[in-house]
Image (cartoon, grey):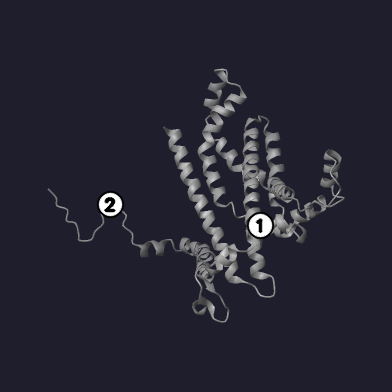
Amino acid sequence: MSKVIAKKGARSPGINKKTWKEDLRKNWIVYVMFLLPFTFLFVFNYMPMAWLAMAFEDFSFRKGILGSDWVGFANFARLFSLDQFWLAFRNTVCMALINLVFGFFFPLVLALLLSEVRVKWFRRGVQTISFLPYFISTVVVCMMFKLFLDKDGIITELLVAIFHITPQNLLTNGDIPVFWLINAFIEVWQKTGYSSIMFVAVLSNIDNSIMEAAAIDGANRWDRLVKIKLPAIMPFVLTMLTLNVGLIFMQGFDKILLLYNSDIYSVADCMQTFTYRYSFTGAKPDYALSTAAGLFQSVIATVLMLISNYMQAGLQKKNAA
């Protein structure tokens, strides 16, 4: 009978107890690759949080964050007393809701329609054509629509011919719904193809045998769409809706900044352009007020995301029951 004497500290076969130093020595290239994005994230996402203190100070560059006088919520009181702020808040909410409805509905419908197409070359062609606008620069897109929406632009002439509206530059029309709908139209045109990709991917995971069994049982395409496909992708739809609600205040700052002008400030100014104007334009930039506006925007977005997440969890429990 042989005896096996285990040495103190010896490792049992099949058990890997590497220390972090050994792992670092072996996989150092992975850590180096991780270092760059981590540094980028830290510098541009976490370090700026220290400057949120400006929202509660009478900030001065000469005194800095630590030396500026603490004023508490005075900047927020001043912010809420501005009519321009409430106009920007109203425009942001309205444009966000319109973009949320149209920007969520059209990609979902496109994905559902593509899932019903059996001709592969046609389906791929439609996907490619709908996806191409996403690669066009926002500056180019805005310049295109400035020409199209001019008094003699192709879109304006089309609307004049169909709806008999007065020939005009639509980007100088200060009526409430006009710019909001223009903004939503550009958003849908540019991002529908890109946003539909995820829905198409989820729909492709549905078992074809279920669809074939439903067809044998007499279910037509509409029945299969409503009773099989939509319920199957509903958890993903709710997840995407939660994420979109959380970004409801993140309107296309660059697009709006390139499209709007002094004639339509009352309907086109949003929270981000409001913050930009008070930060970087004017004889005396008000960094404290713009920081307060940005912090208010972030708090509202966080609350909306939490509410949406809570509602999503409730709906999923209800469906599971």
- Judged from this view, the residue extending furthest toward the front is 81
Residue nearest the observer in this picture, 133 or 75: 75
Quadrant into which the C terminus falls: top left
The disc at residue 13 is 2
Please provide percent x and percent y for residue 160. Answer: 85, 43
Callout 1, which amino acid? Leu
Q: Is residue 137 visible?
A: no
Residue receiving disc 1: 87
Please provide percent x and percent y for residue 37. Answer: 52, 62
Callout 2, which amino acid? Pro
Determine whether the residue tagged by mark 2 lies in a helix, strand or loop. loop
- Name the residue: 71% across, 54% down: 267
**Mark 2: few, some, or many residues within 10 Å (few <14, many ≥20)?**
few
97 sits left or right of 122 in the view: left
- Judged from this view, the residue extending furthest toward the left is 1
How far apart are the alpha carbons under marks 1 and 2? 69 Å
Q: Is residue 124 above or below residue 1?
A: above
Check if mark 1's residue and mark 2's residue have beta carbons within 8 Å. Answer: no
99 sits left or right of 302 in the view: right
Q: Is residue 305 above or below residue 279?
A: above
| Viewer-nearest of discs 1 and 2 | 1
